[in-house]
Image: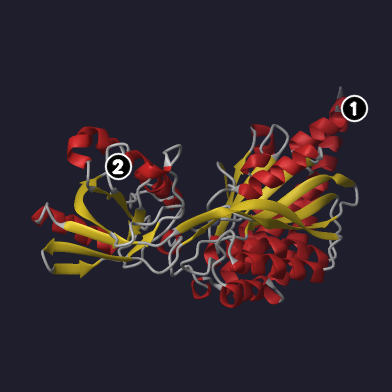
Amino acid sequence: MRTLLLAVCSLFFITESIAQTNFEQDSLKIRSIFDMALLDGKSYEWLDHLSNEIGGRLSGSLEAERAVKYTENELKELGLDRVWLQPVMVPKWTRGLPEYSYIETAPGITSIADICALGGSVATPDGGLKAEVIEVQGIEDLARYGRERIEGKIVFYNRPMKADLIHTFEAYGGCVDQRYSGAMEAAKYGAVGVVVRSMNLRLDDLPHTGTMTYGDLPAEQRIPACAISTNGAEYLSSALKLKPDLKFYFKQNCKTFPDVQSFNVIGEITGSVYPNKYIVVGGHLDSWDLGDGSHDDGAGCVQSMEVLRLFKKINYKPKHTIRVVLFMNEENGLRGGNKYAEDAKLKGEQHVFALESDAGGFTPRGFSFDTDAANFEQIKSWEPLFKPYLIHYFEKGGSGADIGPLKDDGIVLAGLRPDSQRYFDHHHAANDTFDAVNKRELELGGAAMASLVYLMDKYGTKTEMTTVKN
Ligand SMILES: [Zn+2]
């Protein structure tokens, strides 16, 4: 009994000391990743080029194609084992000439409103569209008002994002149905157009675009949809209280063309132990066109590229094949994400872990994981390694839109979670620009991602390890 107890005790101490050694090794490795990112990082320079030399990268645009070529070349410069383009057909929608709009409170008395077309919207008639307005707080109000009060009018969706929610993405999720399905639903009640309050938590003059759908509505029933700035929405709402019969005018010149070919940009370091098992890190290369897409999602792209560059720089040879994927067309179609997953499935590639950065280039706080209890327990045990960098908020939850299609029982999905308080000040608006991204915050995000990928690569996912034993 005593011998057995001693044996158990020494086994315990051996396991403990292995854990201790691993912790020390991992701490040092992670320190070297952060040092390299902060002292000799490349992500900010890449973002500068993407934002200031190329600009907004809407799917199907010349800028999107230039971004493909630029990132492909930059990845080639890193000396990866393979860099290639994965063809994918993407939608092509253009904004055309700038939109124009005003509120007419009495004949000849007008004030300008700041609007932009929603992505995917049809144009207004050539001379623009002028009609009375009915304000609603959401799609559910349409049934309450009914066709007799909506027909022939412009529906104004004015439900604001909830300011008391700490996670601003939750507030976004609580409103975005107005933008995405608002026009389709209002058209069913005979509305002639739709104005949506911008998905923005602060009051300013910038309209925020974003994708919308008409579902199966036939072409002749599709009505134009625009976003109005939050200040504009407040003004329109108060004007409507005084003058319920005021008129809203808008003119937009957007157009949908046939699909065109574009590409996901992919680079990889081949795994030294498991070359046929894949870890993916990525963001989306396309962006909206009003700003230059620095936060959404230029930041995520350059951070993902930085992960592979950091590994090369610190001479880390991963066990798994580590891929960076710059997905095309997340914003208005998700074609790149779907295509990547489809091809991976066709080729029978085993993906064990995927990490996306698509929540802005702000100070990283931690990660969100879409996985089971066993994997999450292992991941939670790594939190102390991230504590020195204040990036140790690990929670269960969503990951990223582009890696979503990879989801199956065998893969762990994760998303970088930066501070989200200022994200929706910029999201899909003209001020999503390079100057809004802080160099250090961007670099900390890339380093945190590289550190997590390093740990996942070294220890493997729990799912993967169980499969190996079987
Ligand atoms: Zn995005």
Q: Residue 294 sits in which quadrant?
A: bottom right
> Is any atom of residue 385 visible in this view?
no
Which residue occupies the foreground of this view, 76 or 413?
76
Across and down, in percent, residue 448 comes to 66, 59
Which badge, 2 or 1, comes first in the chain's sequence?
1
The label on residue 142 is none
Q: Is residue 355 above or below residue 44?
A: above
Q: Residue 31 sits in which quadrant?
A: bottom right
Number of other residues with Cα within 10 Å of mark 2, as a class: few under 14, some 14 to 19, many 20 or more: many
Q: Is residue 180 left or right of residue 238?
A: right
* Screen quadrant of the N terminus: top right
- The number of discs equals 2
The residue at label 1 has a CB less than 8 Å from ligand 1: no
Across and down, in percent, residue 420 comes to 47, 57
Residue under the image location 36 percent in, 52 percent down: 225
Of circles 2 and 1, which is in front?
2
Determine the quadrant in which ligand 1 lies: bottom right
Which residue occupies the foreground of this view, 138 or 408?
138
* Screen quadrant of the C terminus: top right
Across and down, in percent, residue 464 comes to 79, 36
Q: Which residue is mark 1?
A: 3
Work out how far the residue at label 2 is from the one at label 1, CA to CA, in angstroms: 72 Å
Q: Which residue is mark 2?
A: 138
Residue under the image location 70 percent in, 56 percent down: 264
Q: Is residue 232 left or right of residue 382?
A: left
Q: Is residue 3 left or right of residue 465?
A: right
